Image (cartoon, rainbow, N blue to C red):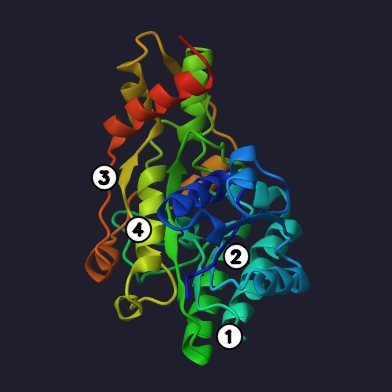
Amino acid sequence: MEDKVLVIGSSGQIGSELVLKLRDIYNPQNIIASDIRKGSDIITQGGPFEILDAKNKEDVYTIVKKHKITQVYLLAAMLSATAERHIEAGWSLNMRTLSNILDLGRDGLVKKIFWPSSIAVFGPNTPQILTPQHTIMDPNTVYGISKLSGERWCEYYSQKFNVDVRSIRYPGIISWKTEPGGGTTDYAIDIFYKALTEGKYTSFLNKTTTLPMLYMPDALKATIDIMQAPEKNILIKSSYNLAGISFNPEELAMEVKKHINDFTISYEPDFRQEIADSWPNSINDDNARKHWKWQHTYGIKEITADMLLNLKQKLKIK
Ligand code: AKB
């Protein structure tokens, strides 16, 4: 029997691109997109789409039974900056949705689950350079606390109920198709929009704030690779460290300047600076590379060139 896949959060930055990628690889009729709000036509018309509030367990179970779903990708979440402003809503969204999906696995309704964790699981006392897989984890944001709790629940459900749940600690994800909302790493996307439309950008992080980042094609590849890997290769049941590249706002601005000569950047750090300061500069992802052959492709040069090229077309800039 062919797998039937449910993507929750299909209108978001990652979900919207993941649906299209999965529909390219598999039969599009087997990829059911879902979100609390209606997404773009390309998502809702290119295959099945359901309006779904994944906090509602009954609704989740109904959709899963209706479409005979075998795999779930849970991409709905409130990111770090927004969750600091909406503590209860962030906690509730991030935890309720995960618990509903893990229960689907425990109850034998689905065979495989993908749930993303984040570099936000680390905190101010975590070693910041090449952060190891197993280390001090003392997140001090709502988002980070929810992700670390989520990791513990994933491992628990895997050990106690044999649920096949797979997870990656996403770094900042850079992309041009759908804008992200409410992340601390979002400066690395905003900068491209502003460089093209205004020729200048004011960064909400200071110039030396180095953070781990990944370009969307690499993020999609990692997500699908871990789901396609044989179960015996998934030795870490909480969440895998994953790295692509690391850079700071000043380095990214210098790269942008190579394409837009008169581009200027200034710095006005806000509350997101403290969040970024508590996260790693770089990540050790040896386990992902060993266990399921993870490899990234895009560096800062390639990301900058591709972002500017695609955003120019999207924003209709000559
Ligand atoms: C955020 O900035 O909140 C996210 C993340 C690193 O998980 N992009």
Q: Position of residue 259 (x, y in %)?
A: 33, 16
The number of numbered discs placed on residues in the rendered structure image is 4
Which element type, helix, strand or loop, lies under badge 2? helix
Front in this rendered view, residue 34 or 129:
34
User: Dot 3 corresponds to which residue?
Assistant: 297
Q: Say which residue appears at 42% left-offset and 63% top-offset.
A: 168
Residue 154 in view here: yes
Badge 1 crowding class, 10 Å Cα cut-off, few under 14, some 14 to 19, many 20 or more, is: some
Instruction: Give the mark nearest the N terminus, 3 or 2.
Output: 2
User: Dot 2 corresponds to which residue?
Assistant: 146
Instruction: Give the mark nearest the N terminus, 4 or 2.
Output: 2
Badge 4 crowding class, 10 Å Cα cut-off, few under 14, some 14 to 19, many 20 or more, is: many
Give the label, 4 or 3, closer to the camera: 3
Location of residue 78 with respect to 303 vertically, above or below: below
Q: Is residue 316 left or right of residue 86?
A: left
Label 4 and label 3: CA atoms lie apart by: 13 Å
Which element type, helix, strand or loop, lies under badge 3? loop
Which element type, helix, strand or loop, lies under badge 4? loop
Ligand 1 under 8 Å from disc 3 Cβ: no
Ligand 1 under 8 Å from disc 4 Cβ: no
Instruction: Give the mark nearest the N terminus, 1 or 3.
Output: 1
Label 2 and label 1: CA atoms lie apart by: 25 Å
Tag 2 and tag 1, C-beta contact below 8 Å: no
Amino acid, disc 1: Gly
Give the label, 1 or 3, closer to the camera: 1
Location of residue 258 with respect to 84 vertically, above or below: above
Q: Say which residue appears at 40% left-offset and 23% top-offset.
A: 308
Tag 1 and tag 3, C-beta contact below 8 Å: no
Label placed on residue 242: 4
